[in-house]
Image: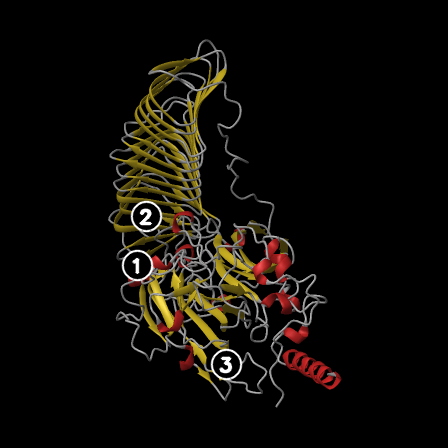
Amino acid sequence: MRSIKIYSLFLTMLMVFVFTSCHKEPSTDPTYIKKMEDLKVPESFDWETSRIINLSLAVDMPSQIGLLSKITVYNGNPLDGGSTLIVGSAGYNFPFVSRLRIPTALKELYFEMKSGDGTVQITNIVVAETMTYTFKETKKGGFKSHNTAADPTCGTGCDGNPTGGSFTISNGKTYCITTSYSGSISITDGTLKICGTFNGTINMAPKGNSDVYLIITDGGNASIGSLSMDKNCLITVYSNSTATIGSFNLNQTARVVNYGTMTINSNFNPNDLVQNFGTMTINGVYNMNGSKSELLNTGTLNINNGQWNVINEVTNEGLIEVSGDINFNQSLVYNECAIISHQSINFNNVTYTSDAGFIRAYTGATVNGGANLTLKNKSMLMCADLIVNNDVIGQGSTSVIKATSTVRINGNKYINGPLEMLTPNGTLVNGSYPDNFKNGATLKSIANTTVIIPISACNPVGNQPENPPTDDRDGDGVPDNLDDYPDDPTRAYNNYWPAKDQFGSLAFEDLWPSRGDYDMNDQVIDCNYWYITNAQNKVVDVKPTFYVRAVGAYLQNGFGWQFDGVLPQAVESVTGIDLRFGYISLAANGVENNQEKAVVIGWDNAENVINRVGGSFYNTENDGFYGISDTIKIILHFGTPQDQAAVGQPPYNPFIIKDMQRSVEVHLPDHVPTSLFDTSLFGTGDDASDPATGRYYKTKDNNLPWAICIPKKFDYTWELVQIVYGHLKFGTWAESGGTLYPDWYENLSGYRDPAQIYTKPAK
């Protein structure tokens, strides 16, 4: 019996040694490392190791007006090894606006501005959900901020809810519509808040000097058939809220403020201040009346089915577009963005100043004797026929006056200062050159223009010479020394994820909808996404590079990704994919057929791209074998450059195709499958996906994922060793909902059990 016991003890010790050598069990003390199945993960946790932030980076530098500067965002100090993340153009009234995916653990970003004249500025800012910064060379201020700190709600400050079909608000009370109301409301002293739905009429008629307020907020929707506003009345439509007004009667000192969406289906005749920071549409004539009439526009103002008659004061920092004529009468107009008439513009008794602004009349424009026009800093006046009856002054950087048909300069009037006037043939119907031009003003044919004004949000036309200056050979507005593609007007900048010359990883479990062993190595794909944008910061090409580092699975899985905001026909071509097994159907442009969104399949079987040298799995077992993957480089080109918001942020929406079954896809948590996925599989096995709530690819019991994305090369565990035993902070990160140890994948002290991390065999 003794010999049997000794033999059994020896056998047990041998088995422990073998299992430990093969890394099948964790060497970490199991009393403080939970198994994946025992984790308590918040239901809302998305398993993201990255976050998406909003960038708005501007340049307010008078010396650079009319030129584009290059903005580069780095993950560290570029003077000390920081890597490029994203690049874009910024100019006067044209900020670089984008979204950016960065590691959650990244605490600060570096912004660099380079101008064509060699000016360089670098700043570092603590990471926030929205990051704004303006590069300046002087103390000259940029646009004023008109956003409120927080929109009001109906959650507090309400004295009650209107009742009945007719209701009166008085005695300074505040009444709130939180659900729906139909009927008529009169306000004599107090406030009406609409946070729900309103349908009816409103009469705002203050008693004495009482102030009366109408507020549409908190997602409210007001359909007002008739709105009457007397003195001391104010209507405010807040962001994400909508007001549609039929008959609109404004008297005396009634004011209008819009941050949301306002539509007026009648003539609009305000006597006091109108402020539009959102989208306002007037389906009628806009008459500015009285000595107090004033307009401040930083959003979009559309005037349909009528003209705009202007008196008093207008400040425009957004877009004003009019279907009919624009008549500037007895007014002071300051334009920093775009004013467009689809008919004619009459500059009558007006002082009009444009600072890098754009104004266009689709037919004719007339500068009458009482008009004083000043065009500053790459401004632009564009029309078909132009009549000049008074001097036009240029200041600062050279501005452009462009007439696509004829120009008449009557009397002894001048084009004066840094202005370039353009006509089809460089000639005038009336007037002459150089007699009517002085102080540097010139007359040229449209084809021979020399002034570059880039296309921007405020100038949809721009001005580009056919033979641009030598410092911008392709004429896209980006100087050659800043342009990654100086001879290609369709491309300007290289952008990267996770960063230039760096790779991230995608790691999958492939047994979905059944839970796997959670070693997260059934397919490990290293990836670097390189995408190219143009001078307007739109995406032209996407050029990812992939390398399959591990296949710890018997299943033969494909790989692809979906652009959730791009239609298939937006893609012109795709090259570099590897399809050999015939179950993927491609359209002529290289994206997958029968998809609602653009889907690219990189390979239909990982065996296509890996090179095994032995062993049952690929680079996950301690068997002495180490295989090499092909480097897969895919090139996707958009026929029309796409907004970055539509394309999304790399790695977009990646997935594997399980065992070459096209209808079975495994995605990152809370990422939607493609059109070819079999939705009947949702909720089967261990899956708890619920499309109605936006929940996808999480387990029923404790919200575990089948895939994760890591913003650097992932050091995965050995075969059958759960990720929690190699990466010791992974479990805490998951149970905290991502707030603790967001850098769990790093090789920091106490973060790993090195014995559980796969190691390339020694040669």
Nearer to us in this view, 604 or 14: 14
**Camera-nearest label, 2 or 3:** 3
**Camera-nearest label, 1 or 2:** 1
Determine which residue is flagged by label 1: 596
What amino acid is found at the position of numbered circle 2 in the picture? Met
Label 2 crowd bin: few (<14), some (14–19), many (20+), radius 10 Å? many
Tag of residue 617: 3
Name the residue at the right extreme: 2
In the rendered image of this protein, does residue 412 appear above or below residue 309?
Answer: below
In the rendered image of this protein, does residue 580 appear above or below residue 73?
Answer: below
* Residue 628 image offset from top left, x and y in percent: 50, 84
> Residue 673's image quarter?
bottom left
- Point 26% across, 42% down: residue: 342
Name the residue at the bottom extreme: 763
Determine which residue is flagged by label 2: 382
What amino acid is found at the position of numbered circle 3 in the picture? Phe
Q: Quadrant of the N terminus?
A: bottom right
Total marks drawn? 3
Q: Secondary structure at mark 3?
A: loop
* Residue 523 image offset from top left, x and y in percent: 48, 73
What amino acid is found at the position of numbered circle 1 in the picture? Glu
In the rendered structure, which disc, 2 or 3, sits on the residue that comes first in sequence?
2
* Residue 339 image offset from top left, x and y in percent: 36, 42
